[in-house]
């Protein structure tokens, strides 16, 4: 597919090499449309070119996002996107790498990758399209299912919802944010900050499933989300925890950058991969230790 | 007097006695003296401390055909106290376990620090016994327990009349320890000298001038290195341009991870310890996706965990080299024992059908050369390439001329990658273009002028998901057609030793080649002509090359380190000829004598399957897990 290399990156850039809008297979009104719109806005604002972009997406409705916008894309196994993205970014740090996955992909089958990528801190943006259900398999509960529900008794079969932001902070993430696909403009601002972050940027995006999640609807989210105060200091971990506690107390869901604290990290060049870089590799020094 | 031809075994307690430290020092000084060493039967337990450990080693003037049988000329027992599970005599797991294998007229050296042991039965067989209170000398005289195995090195060198001036030993010790201080060097030299002195005294006491064995240095124009399969394949990977490695710690593959972590950055690459087996292979696939030659290493349990990603690699056509240092399975199995039990998993593992290539080097040299090939094939066919070694091969060490490594050609051919200049101006690049060979040009993200979508879902030529029956069939056909191309262009015939017509064919694959060849020699001495057909390229199966070899044979016997004859099943299915089997899976290496016995039993009794058994271990010892 051609990367038409437009002089200027515009909103239109992202419609090329992509499934046309009328063929998109998300349910009408799906929250993922908001994520897609916000992502295109963010990429346009930062003037990222499609050829330098790699989107690694998970399995499920969220995974389809890769085909709905221009840019290189990879789609592997359920729970895997963060690990593929990690390897890609390590091998070629010059690429802009974005991974997208649902809350099931990230916090159930892929939680092993999520926890440790927070520690590894590769420079990539991970957008969790959080809808509380496994939509593509027709509505089974996913890790964030039950958010805000008033349930008197829990069971092993039906545990309380997962807390994405708290896990990210605990695991050592250096950028923790939350957005709402019902407000793509605001979400785009968060994505921009995530893309500019020199490390792993986690954005949990509430992306309602209009077909299978009849509880956490757009209206429900609108009634429960709240932008975090302008004076919040995201660089302080204690302030970040306090903010989460405060929002839990008032039963609100914070939108915005909760924590941002880039680490001092080594920088790397892309690994050698072209024949000219790999010709005449001298292994003599390696043999010496076996003499 | 036997000159430059012996097998020795060093045994002791794991971690405490420094068994491998001793064989490493011995190996290196013998190698520097121009003699060949083959040490591939290493025995240890999956525990850090306390279990019995041993390391046999063949020393010879010409490259040894194999590691021979269990019988050894020299037994060196480093353990000095009692085994709580064998109270019949103080000390001596090593002597109890291996004493019966010392040849008549051989040598036993043991640590007598806690007293002499009963060696009557050995003495009756003419074994010369040398009790050496090494631990006591080290502790009391030299004030450093750890040099007790250096005392033993000195003692052994004196017995074998080897390195009388200690020149080889001194050079090695100086290289290793001089930067830590002259006192460390002196301590080691004194320890070796003390070992010599004790032996000297003992020889005088017995009135012996020699012990029947001697090692003589040879002049070497082309120096040897002493290297294990894991390191040889790692260097091969670096030579081949592999610049991304990921692995989760697992015996016996961990050495590859450690080696790559230490050396890959020097070559601009990156090596990462995965947080689990799946992260490792996924990260490698991600690195490969963006153009790096990438590899993972693991052993059976880890390979089982990676199965899902075989499909990702095959379906998205993203190359990855997967090293499997096989160990005894299933489940945790016996982590420190060798086996050849992962053929089915590598060849058939996973849902659906993918193109894949399975290689199995037959020795440390092929660990190097075939690793270069593995990366080339992965690049060309854009699929997973499995590289099956096993514990014996991956940790077993061998002398190889240094020039062997330096003279191998390794041109990195990446002609299946498209560059900016190759892209057609009409923008018609399609990642999964259906071609006659099945191979499509691969774009690397970041290349200006085009983008691609790769997916493990079925897809059209552009990489967009499709379940259209025509597209589905075209893409399946295209992917699997790569294997026909491989058979046509790259699959070699098996290695044939001897004339194939009208004979018994002995078949094997991977690390068993040395024993097959030695068994062949011994069978010939007994009037049985056998041809050895050895496979290093297991899959796709080269029926056209193999079938004619087997059809002409009078009998076909496969020798494998597993219960079923996993590869024999494939041979039988593809060549439509019955294949008998000699199988061993008790955790011990395969020995040539066992093959000879097996073949004779089969010829005499018409048995189709012989399962090799060893006698019980004479000492009950709990091992870790």
Image (spheres, grey):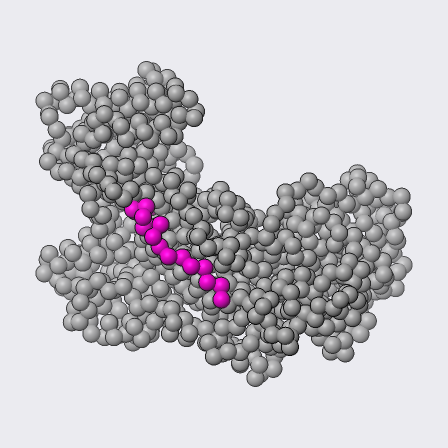
Return the x and y of residue B323 as percentages of the image width and height: 44, 55
Quick one: quadrant of the N terminus of chain B?
Answer: top left
Q: Which quadrant of the view contains residue B520?
A: bottom left
Percent x, y for residue B295?
Answer: 49, 55
Quadrant of residue A130 within the rendered picture: bottom right
Q: Nearer the viewer, residue B2 or A258?
A: B2
**Left or right: B253, with B514 as reference point:** right
Q: In the displayed structure, does residue B286 sit left or right of residue A129?
A: left
Q: Nearer the viewer, residue B245 or A279?
A: A279
Name the residue at the bottom extreme: B470
Residue drawn at x 32%, y 42% is B226
Q: Which residues are magenta?
A: B396-415
Q: The C terminus of chain B appears in which quarter of the rendering? A: top left
Q: Is residue B533 magenta?
A: no
Q: Quadrant location of residue B91? A: top left
* Residue positioned most to the top: B141
Q: Residue at x 71, y 68 (%)?
A: A5
Residue A279 locus on image (x, y percent): 46, 55
Image point 42% across, 74% down: which residue? B485
């Amino acid at each position: 597919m051609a990367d038409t290399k437009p002089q200027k990156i515009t909103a239109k850039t992202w419609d090329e090499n992509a499934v046309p809008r009328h063929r998109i297979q998300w349910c009408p009104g799906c929250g993922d449309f908001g994520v897609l719109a916000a992502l295109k806005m963010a990429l346009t604002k930062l003037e990222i070119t499609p050829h330098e972009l790699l989107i690694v997406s998970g399995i499920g409705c969220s995974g389809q996002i890769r085909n709905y916008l221009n840019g290189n894309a990879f789609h592997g196994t359920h729970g895997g996107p963060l690990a593929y993205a990690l390897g890609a970014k390590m091998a070629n740090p010059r690429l802009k790498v974005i991974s997208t996955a649902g809350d099931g992909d990230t916090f159930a089958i892929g939680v092993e990758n999520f926890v440790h990528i927070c520690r590894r801190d590769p420079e990539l943006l991970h957008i969790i399209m959080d809808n509380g259900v496994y939509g593509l398999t027709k509505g089974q509960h996913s890790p964030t299912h039950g958010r805000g529900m008033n349930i008197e008794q829990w069971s092993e079969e039906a545990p309380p919802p997962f807390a994405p932001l708290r896990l990210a902070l605990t695991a050592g993430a250096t950028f923790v944010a939350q957005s709402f696909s019902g407000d793509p403009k605001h979400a785009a601002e968060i994505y921009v900050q995530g893309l500019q972050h020199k490390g792993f940027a986690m954005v949990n995006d509430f992306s309602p499933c209009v077909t299978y999640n009849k509880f956490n609807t757009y209206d429900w989210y609108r009634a429960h989300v709240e932008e975090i105060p302008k004076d919040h200091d995201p660089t302080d971990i204690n302030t970040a925890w306090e903010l989460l506690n405060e929002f839990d107390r008032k039963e609100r869901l914070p939108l915005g950058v909760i924590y941002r604290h880039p680490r001092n990290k080594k920088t790397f060049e892309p690994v050698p991969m072209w024949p000219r870089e790999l010709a005449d590799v001298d292994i003599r020094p390696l043999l010496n230790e076996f003499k | 007097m036997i000159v430059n031809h012996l097998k020795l075994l060093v045994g002791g307690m794991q971690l405490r006695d420094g068994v491998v430290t001793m064989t490493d020092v011995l190996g290196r000084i013998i190698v520097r003296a121009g003699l060949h060493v083959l040490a591939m039967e290493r025995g240890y337990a999956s525990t850090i401390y306390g279990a019995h450990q041993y390391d046999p080693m063949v020393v010879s003037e010409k490259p040894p055909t194999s590691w021979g049988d269990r019988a050894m000329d020299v037994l060196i027992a480093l353990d000095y106290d009692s085994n709580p599970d064998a109270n019949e005599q103080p000390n001596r797991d090593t002597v109890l376990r291996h004493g019966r294998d010392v040849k008549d007229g051989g040598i036993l050296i043991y640590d007598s620090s806690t007293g002499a042991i009963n060696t009557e039965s050995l003495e009756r067989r003419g074994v010369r016994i040398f009790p050496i209170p090494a631990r006591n000398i080290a502790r009391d005289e030299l004030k450093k327990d750890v040099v007790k195995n250096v005392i033993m090195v000195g003692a052994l060198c004196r017995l074998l009349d080897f390195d009388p001036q200690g020149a080889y030993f001194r050079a090695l010790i100086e290289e290793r320890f001089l930067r830590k201080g002259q006192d460390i060097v002196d301590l080691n030299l004194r320890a070796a000298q003390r070992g010599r002195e004790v032996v000297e005294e003992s020889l005088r006491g017995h009135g012996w001038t020699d012990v029947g064995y001697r090692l003589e240095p040879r002049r070497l124009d082309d120096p040897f290195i002493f290297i294990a399969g894991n390191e040889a394949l790692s260097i091969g990977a670096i030579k081949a341009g592999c610049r991304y490695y990921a692995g989760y710690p697992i015996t016996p593959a961990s050495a590859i991870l450690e080696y790559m972590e230490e050396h890959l950055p020097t070559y601009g690459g990156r090596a990462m310890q995965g947080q689990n087996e799946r992260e490792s292979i996924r990260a490698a696939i991600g690195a490969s996706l963006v153009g790096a030659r990438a590899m993972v290493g693991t052993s059976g349990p880890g390979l089982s965990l990676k199965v899902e990603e075989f499909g990702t690699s095959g379906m998205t056509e993203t190359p990855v080299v997967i090293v499997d240092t096989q160990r005894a399975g299933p489940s945790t199995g016996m982590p420190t024992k060798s086996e050849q039990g992962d053929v089915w998993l590598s060849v058939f593992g996973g849902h659906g059908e993918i193109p894949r290539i399975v290689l199995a080097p037959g020795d440390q040299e092929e660990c190097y050369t075939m690793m270069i090939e593995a990366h080339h094939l992965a690049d060309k066919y854009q699929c997973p390439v499995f590289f099956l070694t096993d514990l014996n091969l991956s940790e077993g060490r061998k002398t190889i001329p240094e020039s062997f490594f330096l003279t191998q050609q390794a041109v990195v051919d990446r002609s299946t990658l498209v560059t900016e200049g190759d892209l057609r101006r009409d923008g018609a690049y399609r990642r999964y273009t259906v071609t006659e060979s099945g191979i499509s040009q691969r774009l690397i993200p970041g290349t200006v002028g085009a983008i691609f979508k790769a997916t493990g879902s079925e897809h059209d030529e552009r990489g967009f998901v499709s379940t259209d029956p025509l597209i589905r069939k075209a893409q399946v056909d295209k992917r699997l057609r790569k294997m026909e191309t491989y058979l046509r262009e790259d699959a070699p015939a098996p290695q044939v030793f001897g004339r194939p017509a009208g004979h018994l064919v002995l078949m094997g694959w991977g690390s068993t080649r040395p024993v097959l060849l030695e068994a062949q020699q011994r069978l010939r001495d007994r009037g049985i002509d056998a041809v050895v057909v050895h496979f290093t390229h297991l899959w796709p199966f080269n029926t056209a090359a193999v079938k004619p070899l087997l059809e002409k044979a009078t009998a076909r016997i496969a020798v494998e380190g597993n219960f079923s004859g996993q590869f024999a099943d494939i041979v039988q299915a593809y060549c439509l000829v019955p294949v008998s089997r000699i199988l061993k899976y008790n955790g011990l290496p395969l020995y040539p004598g066992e093959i000879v016995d097996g073949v004779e039993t089969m010829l005499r009794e018409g048995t189709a399957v012989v399962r090799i058994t060893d006698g019980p271990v004479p000492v009950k010892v709990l091992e870790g897990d």
